[in-house]
Image (cartoon, grey):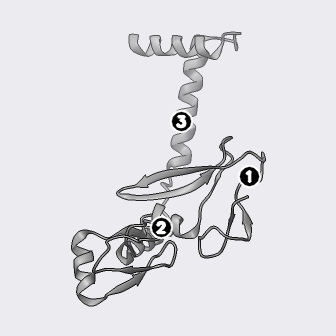
Amino acid sequence: MKTLGLEGRLDTKIDIDLCSTCRGRLALTHDMQHNTPFQYWKCPQNHGHFITFREFLREKDFIRPLTAQQIAELRQNVQTVNCSNCGGPIDLAKQPACPHCGSALSMLDMKQMERMVAQLKQAEQPRPIDPTLPIQLAFDRLAIERHFEAIAPGGGSQSLVEAGIQLVARLLKD
């Protein structure tokens, strides 16, 4: 049984082998968001997926791999960093990735977070509703009802498909 701890390492606490709905075995799935790889465990019956917080941040492009230029710039200021995946030390002078788990160096993208917050604030703003919308919808409904009555007067027993085909043919004629 695989279990997941709070740091994202496989150790103890949460059972991630089985779907909580169908009890099917979850499959480890690898995916990409732009140039950022991430992974999660997916239910074979599509009931959902289980993803760690770190991988969620990668999926949303909040954490992304460092470019070669960013790694070179980091090497000028720092000698070692801890891996964001396993916590192991990475000697920047010798390695561009974690020697313990193979994860690429990555960073939290604050600009992406700012863009997301701005986008959410914009989506939160109430949008004006056209005051004539209810009247326009009522007119449209009457027009459609007239077209269907012309096709099947008296509420005939036509199917919806037959009525639709006749309506399209009538509209093409007009």
Q: CA distance from mark 3 to mark 2?
A: 64 Å
Q: Position of residue 10 (x, y in %)?
A: 63, 67
Q: Amino acid at mark 2?
A: Cys
- Report which residue position mark 3 lands on: 139
Q: Nearer the viewer, residue 134 or 79?
A: 79
Q: Amino acid at mark 3?
A: Phe
Observer-side mark, 1 or 3, equals 1
For image coordinates 45% across by 73% down, the residue present is: 117
Asked if residue 58 lies left or right of residue 161, the reply is: left
Residue 17 vs 67, above or below: the answer is above
Q: Nearer the viewer, residue 99 or 81?
A: 99
Q: Are marks 2 and 1 in contact (CB under 8 Å)?
A: no
N-terminal-most mark, 3 or 2: 2
Q: Amino acid at mark 1?
A: Leu
For image coordinates 64% across by 75% down, the residue present is: 6
- Report which residue position mark 2 lands on: 101
N-terminal-most mark, 1 or 3: 1
- Report which residue position mark 1 lands on: 18
Asked if residue 113 lies left or right of residue 53, the reply is: left
> How dense is the environment of label 2, judged by Cα within 10 Å: few (below 14), some, or many (20 and up)?
few
For image coordinates 35% across by 75% down, the residue present is: 111
